[in-house]
Image: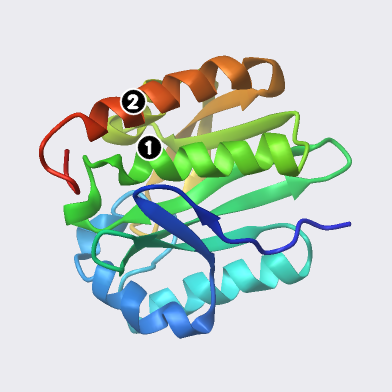
Amino acid sequence: MSPQPATLEGRHVRLEPLATAHHAALCRAGADPDTFRWFPNTVAGEAGMRDYIASGLADQSQGRALPFAIRRLADDCIVGATRFAAIELAHRRAEIGWTWLSGEARRTPVNTECKRLLLAHGFEQLGFNRIEFKTDSRNAASRAALARIGATEEGTFRNHMRMPDGSLRHSVWFSVIREEWPRVRAHLDALLARSLSFAAPVSA
């Protein structure tokens, strides 16, 4: 059976199955076009966001994706989106990607907890053996974030994608495999526990 939409909730965020009803809130969260600087397709604006949602739902209907809207629990605001993509049930693998956050949600526990929830769902409920990530080789912040959560950098696909401005993107691949999940889970739990020890409840 194809993975079914599910709601995943932690202390900071709730990952809700993506729906067309999220369009307006996602447009507000993604109002800064620079949010999508490293995306290989146009997402900014009402039309771009509509296409982003439609592609996720189309892939979900074919069993290739599970897209989510990210709701921050502290203020009940939608602050971004993410998804399982490139799901290959025969090989029990998937990618976590198409991820973006509003500017004020970055450098907070939001991204860390999103990855914790998705990895746990992938390994513990969906039975994946491998979960992978890819990012633009020039996106230093994304590469650092993936290394920070404990993913292993595997290599670079050169000239992998054509960007909206016509340039060619080299994509750097990371992964977490089933055997590493207990270690990565403990590491993510430690990062989240550390964030709770600070005074600021949202941006610690």
Q: On the rendered structure, is 76 left or right of 182?
A: left
Question: Residue sitting at 60 percent across and 33 percent down?
Answer: 132
Q: Is there CB contact under 8 Å for labels 2 and 1?
A: yes
In the foreground, 26 or 124? 124
Report the residue marked by disc 1: 112
Q: On the rendered structure, is 116 left or right of 144?
A: right
Amino acid under disc 2: Leu
Question: Residue sitting at 57 percent across and 76 percent down?
Answer: 54
- Tell me the element at label 1: helix
Question: Residue sitting at 43 percent across and 26 percent down?
Answer: 188
Q: Earlier in the sequence, mark 2 or mark 1?
A: 1
> Mark 1 packing: few (<14 Cα in 10 Å), some, or many (20+)?
many
41 versus 178 height, above or below: below
16 versus 160 height, above or below: below
In the foreground, 21 or 93? 21
198 versus 180 height, above or below: below
Q: In which image quadrant can residue 2 be found?
A: bottom right
Amino acid under disc 1: Thr
Q: Which mark is residue 191?
A: 2
Residue 138 x/y as whole percent: 31, 33
